[in-house]
Image (cartoon, coloured by chain):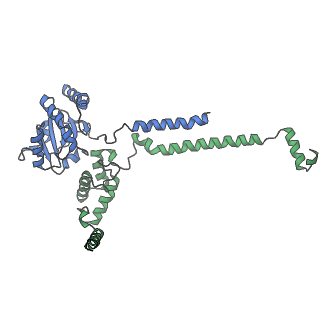
């Protein structure tokens, strides 16, 4: 019986929200925090490379969020803050890489591929139509027979 | 026949790219700081809190800046190599003690040896952000004019030191 009570008590504890686990947010102003969140989603966490710094709990991501918060407080624009990060960590820090000579293939690649595939498909379809047309052409004999069939003279053929 | 060779060719090319990708290091991110002046800072030294260190103090010398911390496991791994390097006197090394308590850092140096001329104490990691540090240990080579010439992320190995780092230093010292 005592075990049962313990079990119930523990279950209730587990269901209570664990406030202590939540990361503290340093900015009190929700508008500032929204901007931190927005910028954080644009920036890659270099420690855990497939996460942005808004989602990441890595030490570096925390520090970078702190930097973003401080720079917002100092009145910097979003553009300036992103430039600050790129100056230190390179374009790799951006989830949306800028259009440059080195990234043209990255941006244009999918469209070039689509164009190539559409051209190939068009060529193939055209060839098939020509082939089908050629297959449908009847010789002089066949045409005569067809005419005869259409005229309802099957019995004679 | 060619209608079967086509997809095969495509597959081989794709497989080739993916295979090559297995041997690339995704953690090796090119630093935009190469070729730029070392970020200016002035901060208390680890061993002498009343004294400060600034990169300007190293002007005229080729030097290494090594980012380390007592909590960093890979730093422990490369440390004996740095101690060896310091003994040869090949290059001046400055430590950047990164996001760590002073006591822990001093104890670590006492335990494992101190290869650095001095260590700058970057308690909150702010200086490291200016250097684009994202994975300790990191090693920067800085030339006489105070320009960052090379950066290595991750622990140094004897082969890397022999084939990459030391030749670069020699070249910078010769010029």
Chain appearing in green on the rendered image = A
Count every numbered label the image shows and give the total: 0
Q: Examine the image and state in which quarter residue A119 appears.
A: top right
Would residue A153 appear left or right of A107 to someone viewing this image? right
- Report the residue at 33% width, 53% height from top: A52
In what quadrant of the picture does the N terminus of chain A appear? bottom left
User: Which is nearer the eye, A153 or B53?
Assistant: A153
Percent across and percent down for residue A143 are 86, 42
Percent across and percent down for residue A45 are 31, 50
Residue lying furthest top: B174
- Report the residue at 9% width, 48% height from top: B103
Chain appearing in blue on the rendered image = B
Percent across and percent down for residue B4 are 59, 36
Residue A95 vs A141, above or below: the answer is below
In what quadrant of the picture does the C terminus of chain A appear? top right
Would residue A29 appear left or right of B69 to someone viewing this image? right
Would residue A91 appear left or right of B73 to someone viewing this image? right
Q: Examine the image and state in which quarter residue B1 appears.
A: top right
Residue A83 vs B19, above or below: the answer is below
User: Which is nearer the eye, A137 or B72?
Assistant: B72
User: Which is nearer the eye, A132 or B17?
Assistant: B17
Residue lying furthest front: A1
Would residue B50 appear left or right of B67 to someone viewing this image? left
Query: Looking at the image, can residue B38 be seen?
Result: no
Percent across and percent down for residue B2 are 60, 34
- Report the residue at 27% width, 69% height from top: A10
Query: Looking at the image, can residue A131 be seen?
Result: yes
Q: Examine the image and state in which quarter residue A70 appears.
A: bottom left
């Amino acid at each position: 019986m005592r075990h049962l009570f313990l079990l119930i008590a523990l279950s209730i504890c587990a269901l209570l929200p664990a406030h202590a686990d939540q990361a503290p947010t340093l900015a009190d102003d929700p508008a500032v925090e929204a901007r931190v969140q927005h910028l954080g989603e644009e920036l890659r966490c270099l420690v855990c490379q497939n996460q942005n710094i808004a989602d990441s709990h890595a030490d570096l991501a925390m520090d970078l969020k702190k930097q973003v918060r401080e720079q917002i407080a100092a009145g910097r624009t979003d553009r300036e803050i992103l430039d600050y990060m790129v100056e230190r960590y390179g374009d790799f820090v951006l989830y949306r890489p800028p259009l440059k000579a080195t990234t043209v293939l990255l941006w244009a690649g999918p469209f070039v591929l689509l164009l190539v595939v559409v051209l190939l498909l068009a060529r193939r379809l055209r060839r098939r139509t020509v082939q089908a047309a050629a297959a449908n052409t009847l010789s002089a004999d066949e045409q005569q027979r067809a005419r005869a069939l259409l005229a309802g003279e099957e019995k004679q053929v | 026949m060619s209608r079967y060779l086509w997809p095969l060719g495509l597959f081989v090319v794709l497989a080739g790219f993916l295979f090559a990708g297995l041997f690339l290091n995704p953690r090796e991110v090119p630093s935009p700081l190469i070729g730029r002046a070392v970020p200016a800072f002035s901060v208390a030294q680890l061993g002498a809190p009343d004294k400060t260190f600034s990169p300007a103090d190293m002007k005229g010398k080729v030097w290494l800046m090594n980012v380390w911390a007592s909590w960093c496991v890979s730093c422990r791994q490369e440390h004996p190599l740095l101690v060896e390097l310091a003994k040869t006197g090949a290059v001046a090394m400055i430590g950047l003690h990164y996001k760590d308590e002073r006591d822990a850092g001093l104890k670590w140096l006492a335990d494992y040896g101190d290869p650095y001329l001095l260590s700058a104490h970057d308690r909150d990691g702010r200086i490291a952000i200016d250097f684009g540090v994202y994975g300790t240990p990191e090693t920067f080579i800085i030339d006489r004019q105070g320009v960052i010439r090379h950066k290595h992320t991750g622990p140094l190995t004897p082969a890397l030191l022999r084939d990459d780092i030391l030749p670069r230093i020699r070249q910078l010292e010769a010029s």
